[in-house]
Amino acid sequence: MKIIISATPLHGHLLPLLPLARALRDRGNEVAVLTSGGVRSVVDSEGFRLFPAGPMPDVLLAEVRARTGMDPAANPTPASVAEFFAGVRVDRTADEALAAAREFAPDLVVREISDYVGPLVAAARDVPMATLAYGPARPPAFWAAFHATAGPRFAARGLSVRPGSWHLDTCPPSLQADDWRQPEGWQPLRPEPHRGPGAPWPVPEKSGRPRVLVTFGTYFNVPEVVSPLLRQLFTLDVDIVATLGLLAEPQRFDVDHGRVIFVPFTPMAGLLDGIDVVLTHGGAGSTLAALSRGIPLVITPQGADQFVQAERVAAVPAGIALPPAEATPQAVTAAVRTVLDELSYREAAAAIAKDIASMPGPAEVAALLERG
C-alpha cells in the first residue's frame, strides 16, 4: 500500500503519528509524510519521504490574527482554533497537498485529528482515511466549528468533509471525561513516548534526591515563563532537568545554571528514566508520555488544548493542575512538593500506565489498517 501521513507542522501533532508510520513501513508499505517543509529535519531523521506543503505555524497564526483578530494559541476558542486548522491552513496548503497526492496516488491517508489537509486529500483521491486522536477528547463544539469552517473550502473544490473509517485513539478510556462515548470506528492505539534515531540522551545517575523534569514542549517553552518556576523550584531538595525546546538557549534562562541540567530537543523516551514528577504545560504528547511510565504531573497550561489535559489529569487525579491565574512560582513549587509527598498521585498515574500498556500497539493497528 501507498500511505500518506498528514499532520499539522507542529511537533506535538506530528510526533504521535510516527510510531504507527514506522509500523506501517516495517510491514512493507510505502509511507510518505505530508506537512510543511519546516519540519523536514524530523521527517528526514525517520527516513520518510516528505511532500512539503504549506507554511509553518508562525505564518498561519499571523494570518489568523490579521483576518479575524483572534489568537488561537493564547485564546483557544472553537472559532479561533477552527480558523487556524480548518480555515487558514487549508487555504494556504491545499493546492500543494493536492498536487502531491496526484503524484503519490495514496491508497490510504492517516491524519492527526486537527489536520484538515489529510481529509481533503482523502476526499479528492476517494481513498479511506484513519484519524489519530491524541489526548482526551475536546468538547463537541470544537469539532462542530472545525467542520463548519472546512466545509465551504471542500465544497469549493467539489468535495465534502467525510468521516474516517477508523478513529485511532491514543488516550486510555480511564483518562476520558465521564460523559465520553466511543466515536464511530473507535480503535485504541497505545501511545508511545517519542523516540528518535541514534543513541538516547545519557541520563545522569540519580543523586538520591527526587528528580523533576520541567518541559514546556517546543512551542510554549518561553524562558520568561520557565525561569521564575525554575528559581522557585531551587527551594526544594530536588534535582532538576529542563528541556530547551527548539529555539531557546541555556543562557536565555535567568537561573543558577549549577542547579539545573538543561537538555536540547531530545525524544521524550530518553528523558523519563528516573523522573519522579513532570512539571509541564500539558501538551498531549508530554502528558501521555509521563503517564505511560506512571509518572505524576504538575500542569500549568499555557494555551491550545492543554487545558483539556490539565483538567483530566487533575480529575483522575494523577497530578495537580494550576490555571494561569493561579500558577505563581510559589504555587507551582508547592504543587510539586505535594505530588512528591503524597503517594496517591503516583498510584493514580501507575493505574493509567497499566491501562496504556494494555492498549494495542502500533504493529497491531497497522495490520488492522491493511486489512481495511
Image (cartoon, helix red, strand yellow):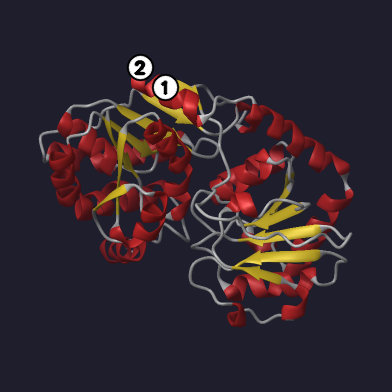
Distance of mark 1 from mark 2, alpha carbons? 6 Å
Residue drawn at x 79%, y 63% as measured from the top left: 333
Q: Which residue is mark 2?
A: 371
* Amino acid type, mark 2: Arg
- Secondary element type, mark 1: helix
Q: Which residue is mark 1?
A: 367
Residue 267 position, x and y percent, is 56, 54
Q: Are marks 1 and 2 in contact (CB under 8 Å)?
A: yes
User: Dot 1: few (<14), some (14–19), or many (≥20) neighbours within 10 Å?
Assistant: few
- Horizontally, is 259 left or right of 288 in the view? right
> Front-most of 27 and 258?
27
Q: Quadrant of the C terminus?
A: top left
**Residue 336, placed above or below residue 312:** below
Regarding residue 141, the answer to whether it shows in the image is: no
Q: In the rendered image, which quarter is residue 347 located in?
A: top right
Residue drawn at x 67%, y 28% as measured from the top left: 355
Residue 23 position, x and y percent, is 44, 33
**The disc label shown at residue 234, or none:** none
Residue drawn at x 73%, y 68% as measured from the top left: 329
- Horizontally, is 188 left or right of 261 in the view? left
- Secondary element type, mark 2: helix
